[in-house]
Amino acid sequence: GAGVSQSPSNKVTEKGKDVELRCDPISGHTALYWYRQSLGQGLEFLIYFQGNSAPDKSGLPSDRFSAERTGGSVSTLTIQRTQQEDSAVYLCASSLRWENNQPQHFGDGTRLSIL
Amino acid sequence: GQSLEQPSEVTAVEGAIVQINCTYQTSGFYGLSWYQQHDGGAPTFLSYNALDGLEETGRFSSFLSRSDSYGYLLLQELQMKDSASYFCAVETGANNLFFGTGTRLTVIP
């Protein structure tokens, strides 16, 4: 596709369930980023991938959060044993390269609601 | 710790000029970016400043002073469609962005 694609666009689930969020970056983009945005707040950086490698996982809020990227393309963000505080919009972005001054192109996000 | 400060809300009249300020304190600095986000939409890239001075892109301009840890986004000839949230973001490492909490701009007739 022409832009970053995220699925699902909305997800409602019960507390304690696991959820998996998917991101399809722009074709050819080697860098991929995950952010979390709570209502009316800024973007909280979670993790980035340079190719398939995630050099820094310190932004993940807890060990319930994990992410992977395969084939240098699609990435999944998994949240295990979801909690109500996990409710937010999860945004994925990609850039052509992982270097300075590379605009990040965002998807429309996945709106996650934990009941 | 790291911090970014920008006003939470700004209101301006259609056709006018508005300036959104951003001050930052971060452990690393490579550049300052601005992103626009309409309600329910994805953030979109507006500008990037790595060096001091003014960068102009159409109706939007962005300024940076590294010595003052300060930048601003200037929007001219405001249009109703400019109503959105505007985020400044510091590039703290190679393309690692630390975002502010955003400024909600409301353009009124």
Image (cartoon, coloured by chain):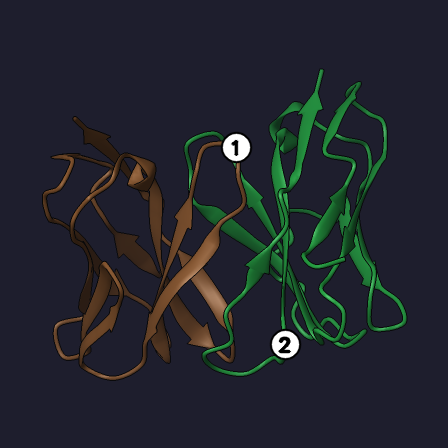
Chain colours: A green, B brown
Taking depth in this image into account, of A59 and B37 the one nearest to the observer is B37
Label 2: how many Cα within 10 Å (few below 14, some 14–19, many 20+): some
In this view, the residue in front, B22 or A64, is B22
Q: Name the residue under label 2.
A: A96
- In the picture, residue A90 is in which quadrant? top right
Image mark 1: chain = B
Position of residue B27 measured from the top left corner of the image (x, y, whole percent): 36, 73
Tag 2, which chain?
A
Q: In this view, does A31 lie to the left or right of A67?
A: left
Residue at coordinates 51% horizontally, 34% vertically from top-left? Answer: A38
Image quarter hosting the N terminus of chain B: bottom left
Give the amino acid type for the residue marked by disc 1 in the picture.
Gly
**Residue under circle 1?**
B40
Measured from the top left, where is residue B8 in percent x and y?
Answer: 25, 37
Give the side of residue B15 with respect to residue A28, left or right.
left
Have a look at marks 2 and 1 and say if they share a chain. Answer: no
* The C terminus of chain B sits in image quarter: top left
Secondary structure beneath label 2: loop
Q: What element carries label 1?
A: loop
